[in-house]
Image (cartoon, coloured by chain):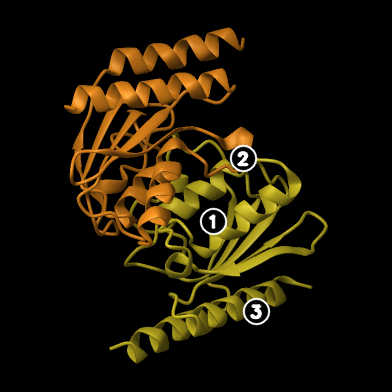
Chain colours: A yellow, B orange
Amino acid sequence: MEFNGFMQAALDEARKAADRGEVPVGAVLVSPQGEIVARDGNRTRALNDPTAHAEILVIRARCAELGSERLPGHDLYVTLEPCAMCATAMSVARIRRLYYGASDPKSGGVEHGARVFTHPQCHHVPEVYDGIAARQAAELLKEFFAARR
Amino acid sequence: MEFNGFMQAALDEARKAADRGEVPVGAVLVSPQGEIVARDGNRTRALNDPTAHAEILVIRARCAELGSERLPGHDLYVTLEPCAMCATAMSVARIRRLYYGASDPKSGGVEHGARVFTHPQCHHVPEVYDGIAARQAAELLKEFFAARR
């Protein structure tokens, strides 16, 4: 499955999150062998956990499965620019590549605000690829927030 | 219990973390009524979870207990300057005040690097008090890393 397929899987997780009443962001984690090994959407409400963003959930799930606190060679696909919490989690987990969809000027921490990966205090920096299926990811979010008003 | 007592409790948790072979950082969470309602130290190794920093663990524990993804009126005491992941977690959890001990030029994200609380992408900023029992916190870390060399 090429990277478009992985982002479509992340978009599926975002749609499922929206159906649960969660902010529609989805993430998938791909192993060094190119298989999807974890996939989830935001669950902050369902889990009563403000850290339960899609990215954190897939990292924690895969680390638990492997019995490791690091995921070398793993790539993370997420529909929205990660916040500073999730970007830092990717760094400490040693994620190889980050692919994301829509830009998030309001809460993002990669190309906006904290710009986590640009500081020497960040000891591992993934390769970052942005703008993948960005329009679809942005529309999901727009529909979700429009429906709630 | 005044704030020195809370930081001493956090230092106790840091010592227990060191005894477990974890990086010696400890945190306690104090309710609006002034009671310690969660306390823990780093557990990234024991839990195989790169996000299991002391601060994240106490936030997650208290949120689970209250059935809420927000902790208004709660104060967090931690022995070391939080990284960008933990600082952002405090923001999304709506922590009222952050008290921390030693400064962390190498990995900190509050007064160093990402400076998470200084950007408009951070939608809630706790009051921050630093340098509390800083010498003790720094010595714990120094001893820990010296013993492992």
Residue A144 versus residue A67: which sits nearer the camera? Answer: A67
Counting residues from the N terminus, which is met first, the one under dot 3 or under dot 1? 3
Q: In which quadrant of the rendered image does the N terminus of chain A lie? A: bottom right
**Circle 1: residue type:** Ile
Chain on which label 3 sits? A
At horizontal 58% and vertical 23% (from top left) the residue drawn is B20
Confirm or deny contact between disc 1 and disc 2 (CB under 8 A).
Answer: no
Residue A123, image x, y percentages: 53, 36
Q: In which quadrant of the rendered image does the C terminus of chain A lie? A: bottom left
Q: Which residue is mark 2?
A: B47
Residue B103 seen in render: no
Chain on which label 1 sits? A
Q: Which mark is residue A56?
A: 1
Q: Which mark is residue A8?
A: 3
**Circle 3: residue type:** Gln
* Side of A23 where B71 appears, left or right: left
Residue B52, image x, y percentages: 52, 41
Among the 4 quarters of the image, the one containing residue B130:
top left
**Circle 2: residue type:** Leu
Tell me the distance, in whole angstroms, between the alpha carbons under discs 1 and 2: 14 Å
Check if mark 3 and mark 1 are on a common chain: yes
Tell me the distance, in whole angstroms, between the alpha carbons under discs 2 and 3: 31 Å
* Side of A102 where B112 appears, left or right: left
Which residue appears farthest toward the right when viewing the image?
A33
Check if mark 1 and mark 2 are on a common chain: no
Among the 4 quarters of the image, the one containing residue A119:
top left
Q: Secondary structure at mark 2?
A: helix
Query: Which-is-in-front pick, marks 1 and 2?
Result: 2
Check if mark 2 and mark 3 are on a common chain: no
Q: Is residue B116 above or below residue A131?
A: above
Q: Secondary structure at mark 3?
A: helix
